[in-house]
Image (cartoon, rainbow, N blue to C red):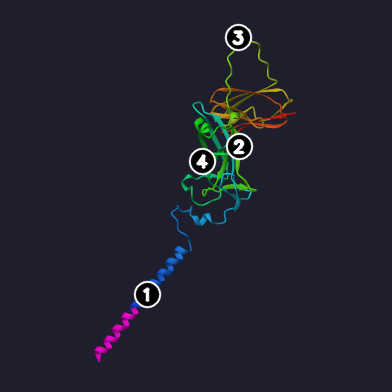
Amino acid sequence: MNHSRRQRRSDRLTRTAVCAVTVLTAGALVFGASACGGRATTHHKPGTSHEQADGDIGRLLAADDGSGHRLREVDAKGAPEVTVAVRPDSEDGWNVHLSVRNFRFTPDSVGGAALLGRGHARLFLDGRPLARVYGPWYHLPASLVRGAGGGTGLTARLYADDHTAWAVDAAPVQAATSLTATAQPTTPVDPRPESSRPESPRPDTTLEIVVSHGRVSPAPGRTEVKKGRTVELRVRSDRADTLHVHGYDKEARLPAGKTVTLSFTADRTGLFEVETHESDLLLTQLVVR
């Protein structure tokens, strides 16, 4: 009799243990399902998962940028912005400089999520894909331009990490410039003795500007110029930079400590700013009437 009671008690304990293991196992499965099923796990680093890529980051449009990348539209306020400038490299090709706003390059997370204000850029030559860029500076070899079939129209366009193109009002965020506009023409040598050469015509307007320690002298102001007159800019900078005349697309390199002269004919009316690219300083404004 005692043996039967002990046996029944042992059977009850065994059934209780089995039930406990079953409950624990089921709980673990449920917990695991909520931990894994509730949030998608990927091989990407934190902040670059496909779960976030599927989130509400802008509006993914059906249209693409013309090269097969869909547009990801965001509001104009706070949207990524880009400007592009190029200058010939003394050894080969061009140096391309991308100035961005509300945006930073994230090469370590390319292929991950589309996070606002992050990603990379692509360069296009006359609409043809040329290169992918992961920083503000890029050296464009002449051989790459020739290999792409040549061209002059260079476009820089901003993309998210998931390769969608950032867009505002259904248009890609991009900037364009011309390679030919930055070419430095070679001045032919006049074989005649200097004493017998005709005098070069004097410019109608000459402005001398000095940039030192981030300050412009004289202070930036406005200069009135009559349409059709010649303007000569003489600029000296204590650091290497690029001189640019907006509206006329005139550029010249500014070697540190050297005076550079840039001349052009003011054949367009309006208000035009003269500035440096790298230091982003306003040098003067030209009012052409």
Report the Cα–Cα distance between label 4 and label 1: 55 Å
Label 3: which residue? 194
Label 1: which residue? 22
Label 2: which residue? 176
Q: Residue furthest bottom?
A: 1
Give x and y (percent) for residue 195: 62, 7
* Quadrant where the image shows the C terminus: top right
* Pointer 4 local density, CA inside 10 Å: few below 14, some 14–19, many at least 20: some
Callout 4: SS: strand
Name the kind of residue labelled 2 in the image: Ala
* Pointer 1 local density, CA inside 10 Å: few below 14, some 14–19, many at least 20: few
In magenta, the rendered stretch is: 1-16
First in residue order: circle 3 vs circle 4 = 4
The vertical placement of 259 against 29, above or below, is above
Look at 58% across and 47% down and name the residue there. Answer: 166
Asked if labels 2 and 3 touch by Cβ distance under 8 angstroms, the answer is no
First in residue order: circle 3 vs circle 1 = 1
| Left or right for 285, reference 147 | right
Give x and y (percent) for residue 287: 72, 30
Q: Main secondary structure of the magenta part?
A: helix
Give x and y (percent) for residue 10: 28, 83
Label 4: which residue? 132
